[in-house]
Amino acid sequence: MSEFLILKKRRDFLRAAKDLTVIVHNVMLQAARPLSGAEHPARIGFTATKRLGKANVRNRTKRRLRAVVREIYGKYALDNVDYVLVGRYSTACCPFENLRTDIIRAFKKINKEIKQENIPDEKAADSAD
């Protein structure tokens, strides 16, 4: 079981919301690209809005998200990236394996976007010469 850093500051959640977003069936994943010079392990935040229901539904949603992230964190989270998992209406009641599959799919999509931006464009480098 991997330990991960938790996002707690509102500004970190807002920064992730403004950057990259991937929506899959049971969850929405937001990510903030690495800041220059800031070296840290991946940080993850969890949120569930009042729109989902009463406190017990929101708490169950966040508990389920944390349980999945504990399993997959080491394999799919990139260093220096802040992730925010936003619970959706179906997060609290969907089968756990479906939730796990959706979160893995979301991590893969968002990591692919981040990695593509970090790879220098070879054509641009050739045209500069």
Image: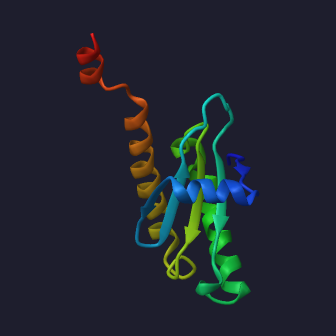
Q: In this rendering, is residue 109 above or below 122?
A: below
Corner quadrant of residue 86: bottom right
97 vs 99, nearest the viewer:
99
Is 105 placed left or right of 39 in the picture? Answer: left
Corner quadrant of residue 79: top right
- Residue drawn 51% across and 45% down? 76
23 vs 33, nearest the viewer:
33
- Residue drawn 59% across and 86% down? 51
Residue 66: % across, % down = 65, 62
Residue 16: % across, % down = 58, 55
- Residue drawn 61% across and 66% down? 65
Q: Residue furthest right?
A: 8
25 vs 47, nearest the viewer:
47
Q: In this rendering, is residue 102 above or below 12?
A: below
Q: Residue furthest top?
A: 129
Is 118 placed left or right of 79 in the picture? Answer: left
- Residue drawn 40% across and 36% down? 117
Q: Residue furthest bottom?
A: 54
Q: Residue furthest front?
A: 128
Residue 113: % across, % down = 39, 44
